[in-house]
Amino acid sequence: MSEFYRETSSLENKAELWFTENHTPNVRFSIRVDTHLISKKSPFQQIDIFTTPEFGKILVLDGYLMLTEKDEFIYHEMVTHVPMAVNPDIKNVLVIGGGDGGTVKQLVKYDTIEKITLVEIDKLVVDLCREYIPAVASELSDKRVSLKFEDGLKFVRQTTEKFDLIIVDSTDPFGPGEGLFTKEFYGNCCKALSDNGIFVNQHESVFYSEYANAMKKAHSKIKEFFPYSLCYQSHIPTYPSGHWLFGFASKVFDPRRDLQFGKWENLNIKTKYYNTTLHLGAFALPQYVRDTLR
Ligand code: SAM
């Protein structure tokens, strides 16, 4: 959980505010804060937004850092361009969670995408991100985006629609996000995908045991439904350990073998982190991660 440290520096005798997140019971990550912009409790979670000198605005849910203006591009580019470069013909996309708008901000770069359904359980997250972090949330107003404020678990249970891509951009496997790490959820996502559909999810990290267990469980459940189920990685400075994983699952695509280099390059999509060379490298996981996954 986060704790706010108010320290009075001995020299200027000025109060300093820090946002601190406990990555483990023995590891803390702190960011100096300029202002605590907003603090609201929704029926689902505590929502805080701060301004910080190093990372710009930061979004915190229930004391866990969700995104920062400075490094959000890494996560959001990796959950979108990896699947899009495997199947550039994707037209109908479902995003579960993602109320900050960062994933949608990347998806709308593709003129080929015809429809984006965003299923976010907490409308207040969308409202506050639109108001306080428009640099990330502004594309939620794109005419192709349809916002649904409901539980993603229930949505995939009852939808009859078929999606070419499902991106699970959820919080961690507790609180409102818990249901998005269950066998039932993965099975229903598999049913909601078209035959050449792709499923991508934020997959935590294995560096700290607290996260590794959740990640191992999620991975073994996803593998039950998809012939191709691989993890890929990126460096996210503000996430626990900085080494963050994503899951790629599909009934037909191997994300390394089927990468459409030429087709994706010809789309001229502007990125700051993703490129097709890094795409292949992202799936070259460290040995300890491979051993954990096995
Ligand atoms: N990129 C962030 C990360 O990896 O931690 C996630 C960002 S986004 C803010 C996570 C969103 O998932 C939150 O807005 C939260 O309200 C939403 N969420 C959590 N559980 C959900 C559920 N069961 N259905 C739909 N949205 C959910």
Image (cartoon, rainbow, N blue to C red):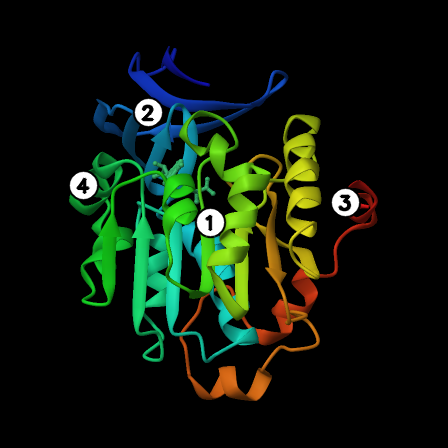
x, y percent for residue 16: 33, 19
Neighbourhood count class around disc 1 (C-alpha, 10 Å): few under 14, some 14–19, many 20 upward: many
Neighbourhood count class around disc 4 (C-alpha, 10 Å): few under 14, some 14–19, many 20 upward: some
Q: Residue at x 64, y 33 (%)?
A: 214
Neighbourhood count class around disc 2 (C-alpha, 10 Å): few under 14, some 14–19, many 20 upward: some
Give the quadrant of ligand 1: top left
Hey, which quadrant is residue 176 in on the image? top left
Hey, which quadrant is residue 42 in on the image? top left
Alpha carbon separation for disc pair 1 and 2: 18 Å
x, y percent for residue 73: 42, 56
| Residue where numbered disc 1 is placed | 168
Residue at disc 3, CB closer than 8 Å to ligand 1: no
Please report whichever mark, 3 or 2, sits nearer to the chain's N-terminal start: 2
As drawn, 36 above or below 119:
above
Q: Is 284 on the left or on the right of 232, as rendered? A: right
Q: Residue at x 61, y 16 (%)?
A: 25
Q: Secondary structure at mark 1?
A: strand
Please report whichever mark, 1 or 4, sits nearer to the chain's N-terminal start: 4
Identified by mark 4, the residue type is Asp
Circle 4/circle 2 CB separation < 8 Å: no
As drawn, 248 above or below 183:
below
Identified by mark 3, the residue type is Leu
Identified by mark 2, the residue type is Gln
Taking depth in this image into account, of 217 and 240 the one nearest to the observer is 217
Q: Secondary structure at mark 3?
A: helix
Determine which of the numbered discs, if any, sits on residue 293 in the image: 3
x, y percent for residue 19: 39, 24
Please report whichever mark, 1 or 2, sits nearer to the chain's N-terminal start: 2
| Residue where numbered disc 4 is placed | 127
